[in-house]
Image (cartoon, helix red, strand yellow):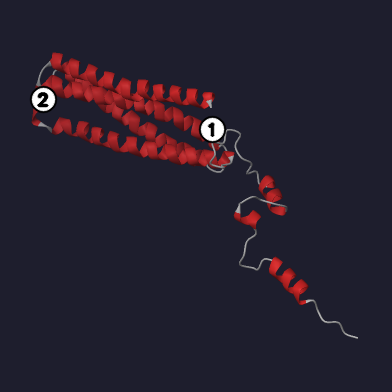
């Protein structure tokens, strides 16, 4: 004798099974389970020990740091290109022959510093090309950070030196020295003292929390 199928049991089981286009709560929450979690652990994407809530692995954090450093280098490159272009056009000006020995010496030093800054900015790209594929992104990020700090210091010198040259030629030597010293002081406050103060406050706030 044939028995009737239980419509409630079969339909309930069918409704409890997710269809191809549906996701389970664990999938929606993004929590890996079973084989997925094993794949994540095996692929080396464990979260960084100093994760700040972004849910990044160590490699992802290094990639993000590298991209941010490239943006910083692009900003500096634009500024130094403007300064270098200005300096390179000075010898073609009619008043360039009026420069005394001190002004010519300062001008040549500024040109050399500008060329050095350009070489430093491009060296980070060369480092990336040489180290590409060796899985040493941490080394690349660390050395690029040193290059950026050195470049910032040299840019400050070029800014002050260029201002000194212009004011010394147009107004006088005393005015040039005052302006150059003032620019160095402002650069020191904005680029060294202020960032360090913010960093110290942020570290203190993190320690307190």
Other residues around mark 2 within 10 Å, as few (<14) / some (14–19) / many (≥20): few
The x and y percentages for residue 30 are 61, 51
User: Is 139 above or below relative to 55?
Assistant: above
Which part of the image, by quadrant, shows the N terminus?
Answer: bottom right
Q: Residue furthest top?
A: 174
Residue located at (31% from left, 31% from top): 115
Residue located at (37% from left, 33% from top): 119
Which one is in front, 102 or 2? 2
Name which quarter of the figure residue 166 lies in.
top left
Residue at mark 2 to residue at mark 1: CA–CA distance: 48 Å
Which one is in front, 10 or 55? 10
- Is residue 135 among what the camera can see? no
User: Is 50 above or below relative to 183?
Assistant: below
Please name the residue that numbered disc 1 is placed on.
139
Q: Residue furthest bottom?
A: 1
Residue located at (21% from left, 31% from top): 87
Name which quarter of the figure residue 12 lies in.
bottom right
Which one is in front, 102 or 17? 17
Q: Which mark is residue 63?
A: none
Please name the residue that numbered disc 2 is placed on.
97
């Amino acid at each position: 004798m044939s028995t009737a199928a239980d419509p409630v049991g079969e339909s309930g089981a069918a409704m409890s099974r997710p269809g191809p286009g549906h996701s389970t709560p664990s999938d929606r929450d993004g929590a890996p389970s079973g084989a997925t979690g094993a794949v994540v652990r095996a692929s080396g994407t464990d979260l960084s020990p100093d994760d700040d809530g972004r849910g990044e692995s160590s490699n992802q954090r290094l990639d993000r740091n590298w991209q941010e450093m490239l943006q910083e280098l692009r900003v500096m490159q634009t500024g130094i290109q403007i300064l270098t272009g200005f300096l390179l056009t000075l010898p073609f000006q009619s008043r360039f022959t009026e420069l005394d020995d001190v002004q010519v010496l300062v001008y040549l030093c500024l040109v050399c510093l500008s060329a050095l800054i350009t070489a430093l900015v491009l060296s980070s790209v060369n480092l990336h090309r040489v180290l590409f594929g060796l899985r040493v992104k941490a080394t690349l990020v660390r050395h690029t950070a040193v290059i950026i700090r050195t470049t910032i210091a040299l840019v400050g010198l070029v800014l002050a030196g260029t201002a000194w040259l212009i004011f010394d030629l147009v107004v006088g030597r005393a005015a040039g020295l005052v302006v150059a010293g003032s620019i160095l002081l402002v650069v020191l406050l904005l680029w060294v003292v202020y960032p360090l103060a913010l960093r110290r406050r942020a570290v203190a706030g993190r320690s307190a929390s």
